[in-house]
Image (cartoon, rainbow, N blue to C red):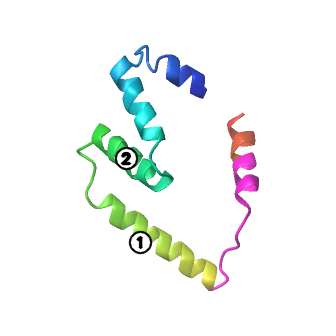
Amino acid sequence: MDIDGLRSGFYGVSMTSESQKIEKQAQDLSPKERARLALKLIESLDPGEDEDVEELWLDEAERRLADYDAGKTKARPADEVFAEIEKKLG
């Protein structure tokens, strides 16, 4: 679904005027504030998330960085990676 599809109704639910007003206010926030708000909203959708997930992802990121620093892995441009993913997903 494209962004216009999301705005017109996600899962058949249209945004209320109050939701639209909040969205407009959110767009006026700084990028950092919007990112924090987005994270909080996403987290609110699944409050039962495993509390260890963030720590596990941090451990994984540190492991990957150590592998990169040790020359075990190579970096690739993001656009190359995303193009490969899009090709695989069709």
| The magenta stretch spans residue 82 | yes
Identity, as a three-letter code, of the amino acid under mark 2:
Leu
Name the residue located 61 percent from the left edge and 26 percent from the top edge. Answer: 2
- Residue at left offset 68%, top offset 37%: 89
Q: Which of marks 2 and 1 is in front?
A: 2
- Residue 38 at what x, y percent from top left? 41, 45
Tag 1: Cα neighbours inside 10 Å, few (<14), some, or many (≥20)? few
Per the model, the C-alpha gap separating discs 2 and 1 is 25 Å
Q: Which amino acid does label 1 sit on?
A: Asp
x then y, percent, for residue 49: 28, 48
At a point 46% along the width and 56% down the height, the residue shown is 32
Residue 29 x %, y %: 44, 46
Part of the protein shown in magenta? 70-84
Dot 1: element: helix
Vertical side of 39 occupied by 18: above or below = above
Q: Check disc 1 and report the residue beneath it.
A: 59
Q: Specify the quadrant that holds the N terminus.
A: top right
Res. 40 in view:
yes
Task: Identify the mark nearer the N-term, 2 or 1.
Answer: 2
Q: What element carries label 2?
A: helix
| Image position, residue 78 (x, y; %) | 70, 57
The structure residue drawn at horizontal position 35% and vertical position 61%, both measured from the top left corner, is 54
Residue 85 to residue 14: above or below: below
Residue 37's label in the rendered image is 2
How many numbered dots are placed on residues in this image? 2
Residue 81 magenta-highlighted: yes
Structural crowding at the residue carrying mark 2, measured as other residues with C-alpha within 10 Å and reported as few (<14), some (14–19) or many (≥20): some
Image quarter in which the C terminus is found = top right
User: Taking 7 as reference, is 74 above or below it?
Assistant: below
Q: Nearer the viewer, residue 8 or 56?
A: 8
